[in-house]
Image: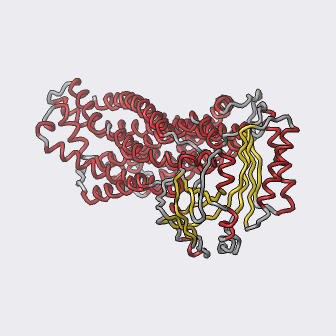
Amino acid sequence: MKSGFYLRLAAGGMRRNSRLYVPYLVTCVMMVAVYYILHFLGYSGVMDDMAGGHTAEDMMQIGTYIMSLFGLLFLFYTHAALIKGRKKEFGLYSILGMNRFNLGRIIFFETLITWGISIAGGLASGIGLSKLAELGFTRMIDVPVRYSFSVSGSSVAWTIVTYSVIFVLICLNSIRQVGFSSPIELVRADRAGEKPPKANRIIGALGLITLGAGYFIALKIQQPMSALMWFFAAVILIIIGTYLLLTAGSVILCRMLQKNKNYYYKTNHFISVSSMAYRMKRNGAGLASICILLTMILVMISSTSALYTGADECLNVRYPNEIGAFACKYGYDESLERLGDKLDADLKNAAEKHGARITNNKTYYEWSVSGHFDNSKLDITLNSKTNLAFVNYDKVAQILFLDVDVYNRVFGYNEKVAPGEALVGTKKNIDIGDILTIGDVPFKVRKRIDDRISEIDPAALVSASPGIFVIVDDVNKVAEKYKEYGDYNGDPMLAWFWNCRFDTGLDVNGQIALADTLGKVLKKEIAPLHFDNSYCESHEDERGDFVSTFGGLFFLGILLSIIFLVSCVIIIYYKQVSEGYEDQSRFEIMQKVGMTKEEIRASINSQILTVFLIPIIFACVHLAAVLPVVNKLQMLFGLFDMPRLLITSGICVLICGIVYAIIYRITSNAYYKIVS
């Protein structure tokens, strides 16, 4: 046979099954368009000249990887459901004499047509909407608009390559599905859900345990570093637990409803429950997929909108002064104190020459060691890679020693500390007793100054590892006791930190220019001394990075949420259509024995209320469980506003619930038209 024959068969099959193919093609076009937009914003260089543009590009580049992975998984899932609806047709072709090779050619041309429509439509939509997306994004991150339109050839090429690979894999999987089934199996594929499933209590219990383990990890995390390390482990456990629990639990739910005679033996419940009972194992997997997508939408939009609306708060926490300078050198050197005074004088002189009026000056130095903190003792003797591999990073802490005289002079206090005593403060959740032991040196805790930490060092609030500030009588004598400690490479663990912060009264451009000048002065002064790190920053210069980072995350969250929402709609739609065809014969019989259309509608509504509320309820429970972890992760950005996160989460749940209800009401009409 000529290849044109198979092409006509493929096109005719897609046209006859337009109810299945049109939503699938629309989804493919949208995914290709969004991938192009993300790749265009991330790789074309259109944001290179924007303030914080490189940070924003990083966000978009992450989005392209997410879209590639999600596009592969979701299109596999939906196309498998689509092919299942076509198996009866392929079975008839097989009975009429077609072999596996012939059926494979039909599937190949169907995939080729889908690929062509998806790539052409997706690229046309993506290119057309890319400027709109760019304008929206620049508005979101508050940067000047670029009044020119461009098309990225590399983005077009990468979009074609990425989705060509995805469609090749989908084609091979579809050929496998059809090719390894006998003609009888293909013809009877739409009856595959007729066998009543068993309520597997072992799977249900395993799902409950796995879900509980995910919740336990999420609720147990106390430190931001642990949140960073354990968040994805908790997410994976919650996803697995959701699939297991809904797959087994939905079967158990139907069995319980059937045993409840007052509920089951009613016209609007009897048909829906008995129909669901035959397909709840597969139905549970679909509900779990919907639940996970809803949870992802809620978590992404809640967290990114909280960060975006709290960007100024985070910026002010991290950079409370207009200008900040920092220098770091490892190893003990008693001359560093004099160097710090010289650096302070040189920077202030340079600032005054620049027209700055110095106010709110906070200049001081600290000595620091790090190690494993437990039971009020810091162990800094870990000196091998083997030991470090087994460190509990939730208990890694940084000790910062500050001289009491410097502390009083800079921050305006009048504290007194005797030798062997210390004022101790931390913003993290750390238990410190009456005696604080650092290495082999004990310090009697004279007073807690937890409420002063943000004043001493704003950066400590957003540090991944907990910081413990220790105010002592003579910081240099204390530091000398730790000069022999080294890491597994033999490098000193003792570090000297010099901090300088002040306000200038200059305008935005003046602050940015001054920070650049002071940075050059600082590097020139310490160049011969081989410092390990140094920089100078301004509050206004960092604003671009903050707004770009949080705006990029919010923009990415919106785009991905739209895709996830569309994916959720497609799953629901295919679920309604496939179940409609399965239930069609049952409702035909019930209508013949006297069931009215109003009773059919009531039965459908009963099914929606019984089952389809499960995903949104589970999604809300998942959101509540992971919010504490999300809050810990936001602390790494400097956002400590849990009420803000709760408010954004509540708004997202409300909006998502309304949209979800509308989606199910619309898709239930498709089910109703089929069965009636």
In the displayed structure image, the side of residue 585 where residue 370 appears, left or right:
right
Residue 500 visible in the snapshot:
yes
Q: Position of residue 292 (x, y in %)?
A: 42, 45
From this view, report whether residue 480 is shown above or below residue 59: below
Q: Position of residue 670 (x, y in %)?
A: 36, 30
Q: Is residue 409 left or right of residue 351?
A: left
- Give above or below for 274 relative to 395: above
Left or right: residue 297 versus residue 546 is left
Whether residue 152 is visible, yes or no, is no
Does residue 190 appear left or right of residue 371 in this picture? Answer: left
For the C terminus, the quadrant is top left
Taking the spot 74% from the left edge, 35% from the top edge, the residue there is: 151
Res 332 quadrant in image: bottom right
In the image shown, does 568 or 356 lie closer to the viewer? 356
The percent coordinates of residue 247 (x first, y second) are: 31, 51
Number of marks in picture: 0
Where does residue 300 sit, x and y in percent of width and height? Answer: 51, 41
Q: Residue 529 falls in which quadrant of the image?
A: bottom right
* Of the pair 144 and 292, the residue shown nearer to us: 144
Residue name at image x 75 percent, y 57 percent = 533
What residue is drawn where x is 51% and y is 37%? 301
